[in-house]
Image (spheres, rainbow, N blue to C red):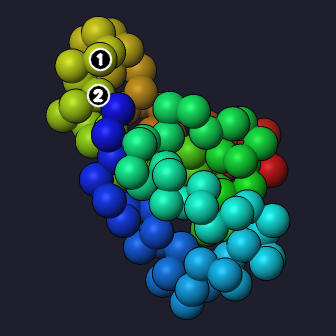
Amino acid sequence: MNGKSGRLQELVLKKYGNLQRFQDETGIPRTNIYNWDRRGIDTMSIANLRAVCEALDCAPDEIAELYYPMGKRAEICSEEEQRLLEKFRNDEQVANAIRLVIR
């Protein structure tokens, strides 16, 4: 999966101003951001996903959306899976529970 350059980096820069500050505060090397943007997030560890989500105050599906837009995910998932994803995404209680689990 080839990521479009800069998607995750843009989020990091909005919150942290520069990648070095992000690296200093999270312990995630800035080269990881470059690599994820260039190659995609398929190889991102769960620990790094949690750290990125915590640092950017977002949910994992928001990071996934950068690399797998809904239209693209529709090609990957069945209609039933898409329906369930939408149901859970729109359920605030479920979304909050997911955020608690990953933190």
Amino acid of disc 2:
Arg
Q: Is residue 90 visible?
A: no
Left or right: residue 9 versus residue 76 is right
Three-letter amino acid code at the position of disc 1: Ile
Badge 1 marks a residue whose secondary structure is: helix
Q: Nearer the viewer, residue 72 or 35?
A: 35
Whether residue 12 sits left or right of residue 66 in the image: it is: right
Give above or below for 88 relative to 40: above
Q: Viewer-proximal residue, 29 or 86?
A: 29
Q: CA distance from mark 2 to mark 1?
A: 5 Å
**Mark 2 highlights which residue?**
73
As drawn, 102 above or below 87: below
- Residue designated by label 1: 76
On screen, residue 98 above or below 84: below
Label 2: few (<14), some (14–19) or many (≥20) C-alpha neighbours in 10 Å:
some
9 sits left or right of 51 in the view = left
Give x and y (percent) for residue 32. Answer: 60, 55
